[in-house]
Amino acid sequence: MSESYRLLFRTTGGPEVVESEPLGSLSPGPGELLVRHEAVGLNFIDTYHRSGHYPVPLPSGLGAEAAGQVEAVGEGVADFHEGDRIGYFSGPLGAYATHRVIDAFRAVKLPETVDAETAAAVLLKGCTAEYLIERCARVQAGDTILVHAAAGGVGSILVPWLKAIGATVIAHAGSAEKAAMAKALGADHALSCPMDELAEAVRERTQGRGVRAALDGVGAASWEASLASLARRGLLVTYGNASGPVPPIRTLDLTSAGSVFVTRPTLADYAATPEERQASAARLFAMIASGKVSVRIGARYKLRDAADAHRALESRTTTGSTLLIP
């Protein structure tokens, strides 16, 4: 095995708490795979773990998404073999590493049309988009949907996916440049107005009705705008906290907004079994193969430079997906 190491943090804090340590000899146990990573996916939730916003036992690894090649197979594993190309996108944390032993049931085989960088860039974000659209919000053709952070990692997949199934998309992004990117992805309306002007802009574009659902990964800063943008009996899906957690909810606010619904889902509950993970990934790969969803890698960092990648992500200067390359 060539030089092997992992990144971890022993105390919560800023990107500077991320450190490296060498890996010893690794071998898979029963039901496990030893994987040599070719690419590791960077996701905003990684910064939540590192900062302590989502507490985890310390010391802790980082990252839940990577792709590479199987180097060894543990006893009892029948579905994977040495040399197989695989990806994974569900815990436990520890994907920021050159090599890793994982439970075989967490892995998905990559089709020939999907390389390791594409898989690491899209699996977690793309399977998030799949469950948000198709199993959480259950979007139908003709629905009008508001997408926040529409040029980001998840947003840049949500927009074309929604268009592919016949939805009307109102995209919101943090700058005119990012709104233009969302427009290029197919958004019917691409906005970059301040949050306190967003609901009015949405109503203007929906003849006053509002949207059937808002897919909101921003959190605190967008909560009121999302709520005010909903149509009667609409659905607010708050799935991320890029600007901080949503404030406490008063149920009467849901009444005054039009008897609306709110859910705070997580991918773990929509990809809880091997069957759910495989089905979600298969749907994602089919959308990519059809050309309806494309994967844009906005930046690549060396794995050792993960702290710099975190800084870029938290400053909201990234677009598309960011990769860490071992």
Image (cartoon, rainbow, N blue to C red):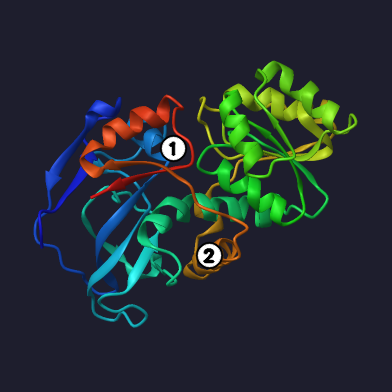
Determine crowd level at label 1: few under 14, some 14-19, many 20+ residues with C-alpha closer than 10 A: some
- The percent position of residue 294, horizontal first and vertical second, equals 54, 54
Mark 2: give few (<14), some (14-19) or many (20+) Cα within 10 Å.
many
Q: CA distance from mark 1 to mark 2?
A: 22 Å
The amino acid on which the numbered mark 2 sits, given as a three-letter code, is Phe
Count up the numbered dots. 2
**Viewed as shown, does residue 312 lie left or right of 153?**
left
| Residue at the image point whose x is 26% and y is 75% from the top | 83
Q: Position of residue 77 (x, y in %)?
A: 31, 79
Query: Which residue shows up at 46% across the image and 56% down it?
Result: 123
In which quarter of the view is residue 2 placed?
bottom left
Residue behind mark 1? 44
Q: Position of residue 64 (x, y in %)?
A: 37, 50
Q: Look at the picture and state if 107 lies above or below 119.
A: below
Numbered mark located on residue 285 in the image: 2
> Based on the displayed image, in which of its 4 quarters is residue 284 positioned?
bottom right
Q: Residue furthest right?
A: 207
* Image mark for residue 180: none
Q: Say which element carries label 2.
A: helix
Instruction: Give the foreground label among 1 and 2.
Output: 2
Image location (x, y in percent) of residue 42: 38, 43
Between 243 and 153, the one nearer to me in the picture? 153
Q: Is residue 92 visible?
A: yes
Q: Is residue 214 above or below residue 5?
A: above
Label located before the other in sequence (1 or 2) = 1
Residue type of the residue flagged with mark 1:
Phe
